[in-house]
Image (cartoon, rainbow, N blue to C red):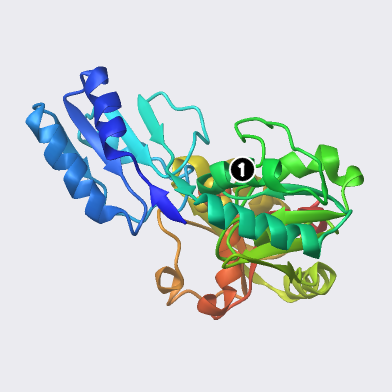
């Protein structure tokens, strides 16, 4: 499978906006293509700044950079729209394209592994075209399609939003995750058997033991005295109002809370602070890397009930 960026199509779309100054955001791995895009835009007299900050999702829209340099367009590559913005934005998702042979092989594997099951296909937006083809190609399973939900397209999940699964969860025996890595799949909390792609094979995916995690988080939270509440300035991940209400709730419980703000969240930024645990109000997937934090870090949704 290959990721198709369609640079010519993108440049054409940008040129039609007649923007003079552009902020270009590109996920890691596609930066080399960014240089090609910038050179093409230069021929049309368009000045483009490449954001060299990491881009983890469409929530990570470079509005601050855009405002700072007074850009008239943000071009965000790799994701679909996540939040409404006052800035003018072109979202340019790129899609994996699979050959006919690859689709046939994967569909056959799904048919034999999930025979007669009612299943739905989900994945990150980059796999949307592959999902559409597989839904048509499988023969031995009953495909239950998801519908669009908010800004999510049918079949699309994010690492922080799997809401498209809600309305169909009682109708399915299995979820087939079409994607790579664990970032998106680990957001699925429905108690339904998940299958995932491994190369062209389809294998069972074991979900984390959420109950064990919940009990552990409750214990850590109850014992903690000095609590850091992490807030990010990233437009689509900013939850400062939630952070402030948690802050008030913690004070009422006699704990010592501290509001901490940064753009990119990482452990080295809290070194030197005396904290027993962190409550994360930014991207929920940050806590998947909790080994990097050296002190316990808990997503805010997991502690809300313990504060009210
Ligand atoms: S908040 Fe996290 S999971 Fe959600 S879109 Fe942003 S990077 Fe992805």
- Residue at 58% across / 78% down in the picture? 295
Residue where numbered disc 1 is placed: 133
Q: Is residue 148 above or below residue 221?
A: above
Q: Is residue 84 above or below residue 239?
A: above
Q: Is residue 267 above or below residue 302?
A: below
- Residue at 79% across / 65% down in the picture? 113
**Residue 74 shows up from this direction:** yes
Q: Residues within 10 Å of mark 1 (few under 14, many from 20)?
A: some
Horizontal and vertical percent for residue 35? 18, 48
Nearest to the observer: residue 139 or residue 38 = 139
- Residue at 37% across / 52% down in the picture? 27
Snapshot quadrant of residue 230: bottom right
Horizontal and vertical percent for residue 181? 55, 65
Q: Is residue 195 left or right of residue 67?
A: right
Question: Circle 1 sits in a helix, a strand or a loop, which is it?
Answer: helix
**Residue 67 shows up from this direction:** no
Nearest to the observer: residue 115 or residue 53 = 115
Snapshot quadrant of residue 21: top left
Q: Is residue 49 left or right of residue 264?
A: left
What is the number of callouts on the image? Answer: 1
Nearest to the observer: residue 210 or residue 194 = 194
Horizontal and vertical percent for residue 304? 76, 53
Horizontal and vertical percent for residue 94? 42, 43
Mark 1 CB lies closer than 8 A to ligand 1: no
Q: Is residue 82 above or below residue 104?
A: above
């Amino acid at each position: 499978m290959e990721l198709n960026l369609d640079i010519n199509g993108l440049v054409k779309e940008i040129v039609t906006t007649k923007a003079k100054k552009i902020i270009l955001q590109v996920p890691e791995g596609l930066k080399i293509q960014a240089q090609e895009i910038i050179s093409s835009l230069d021929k049309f007299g368009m000045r483009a700044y490449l954001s060299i900050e990491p881009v983890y999702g469409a929530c990570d829209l470079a509005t601050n950079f855009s405002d700072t340099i007074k850009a008239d367009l943000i071009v965000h590559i790799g994701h679909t729209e996540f939040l409404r913005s006052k800035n003018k934005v072109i979202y340019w998702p790129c899609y994996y394209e699979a050959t006919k042979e690859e689709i046939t092989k994967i569909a056959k594997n799904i048919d034999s592994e999930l025979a007669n099951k009612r299943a739905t296909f989900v994945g990150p937006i980059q796999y949307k075209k592959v999902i559409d083809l597989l839904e048509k190609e499988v023969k031995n399973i009953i495909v239950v399609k998801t519908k669009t939900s908010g800004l999510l397209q049918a079949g699309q999940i994010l690492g922080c939003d799997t809401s498209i699964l809600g309305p169909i969860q009682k109708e399915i025996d299995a979820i087939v995750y079409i994607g790579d890595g664990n970032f998106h799949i680990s957001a699925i909390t429905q108690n339904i058997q998940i299958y995932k792609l491994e190369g062209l094979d389809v294998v069972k995916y074991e979900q984390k033991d959420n109950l064990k995690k919940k009990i552990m988080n409750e214990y850590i939270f109850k014992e903690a005295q000095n609590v850091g509440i992490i807030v990010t300035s990233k437009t689509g991940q900013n939850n400062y109002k939630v952070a402030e209400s948690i802050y008030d709730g913690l004070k009422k419980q006699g704990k010592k809370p501290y509001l901490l703000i940064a753009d990119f969240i990482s452990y080295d930024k809290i070194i030197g602070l005396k904290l027993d645990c962190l409550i994360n109000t930014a991207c929920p997937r940050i806590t998947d890397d909790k080994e990097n934090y050296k002190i316990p870090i808990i997503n805010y949704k997991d502690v809300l009930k313990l504060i009210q």
